[in-house]
Amino acid sequence: MLRFFGRGAGFSDEHNSACFSMREKLVIMDCPLITFNKLKKDVSIGENYSEIIALITHTHSDHIGGLALVIHYAKFIWKIKITVVAPSEEVKDNLAYVLKNLDGCGEEAYHIVTAGEFMTHEENSWLRAVIPTTHVPQLEGKCFGYNISVDGTNTVYTGDTNTLEPFIPYLSEGSELYTECSAYDTGVHMYVEKLLGYEEFFKEKHIIVYLMHLDDVGRIESRVKDTDFRFAPLI
């Protein structure tokens, strides 16, 4: 199961970001400021992990706003390595430019690769697929979700998306789905009413659905109260 530093949408106080651990490695899904703040407060990070892997879905500030800070902090305080995994070559180039030229991260402090390059190593077989999706037109072709294995469970993480269709082929029997859920029909996020249309499909395949990137918890809670949908678990 993924655990969340925050599960709020872009205008919230605690932006959406999750994590899980594998032996001496900590994997974080995106890296907003709340991720940096909570990692900094966990004094055991440097002792428990030899590497942090940041799996990035897209480059909106509520998803990468804390990434450079984590890289700086890891270098000077934890003395551990940061691996940044970009979903595509284009996103990798965008991230590399920001980290080097705008945030001034030393190239010795982090390693940035595409997910395709990352998956060529057998030890990274937990990352099963990169899933292109649609979000805002300004980032067309640069928004993605992931299919990963977490403690042996097939897991799908949508990132920011306005549709579930690209993720359906990756949802096998008994999977865990972490999907964003919006109380408002903005056209760029996964509207709760559209999500409810998949309820029978989820039941038939025994898929556990966790809601994340929430814009209005009260409205969403009221709308899904009679379903099996759950809010993503916070750390």
Image (cartoon, grey):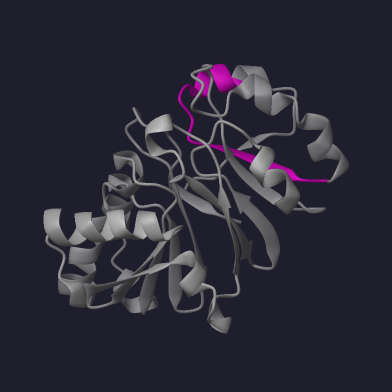
Residue 71, above or below 61:
below
Choose top left, top right, bottom left or bottom right for residue 191. top right
Which of these two is toward me, 155 or 22? 155
Lateral position of residue 3 relative to residue 114, left or right: right
The furthest residue to the bottom: 122
The furthest residue to the right: 204
Which of these two is toward me, 100 or 209? 100
Tell whether position 212 is magenta. Answer: yes
Going 34% across and 27% down the picture, which residue do you hit? 11
Going 71% across and 25% down the picture, which residue do you hit? 196
x, y percentage for residue 122? 58, 83
Which of these two is toward me, 152 or 99? 99
Lateral position of residue 149 relative to residue 58, left or right: right
Going 43% across and 68% down the picture, which residue do you hit? 26
Span highlighted in magenta in the image: 206-221
Q: Is residue 47 visible?
A: yes
Q: Quadrant of the N terminus?
A: bottom right
x, y percentage for residue 32? 32, 47
Tell whether position 64 is magenta. Answer: no
Q: Is residue 41 visible?
A: no
Going 46% across and 57% down the picture, which residue do you hit? 87
Residue 33, above or below 120:
above
x, y percentage for residue 23? 51, 78
The tally of labels here is 0
Choose top left, top right, bottom left or bottom right for residue 81. bottom left
x, y percentage for residue 157? 57, 49
Residue 142, above or below 226:
below
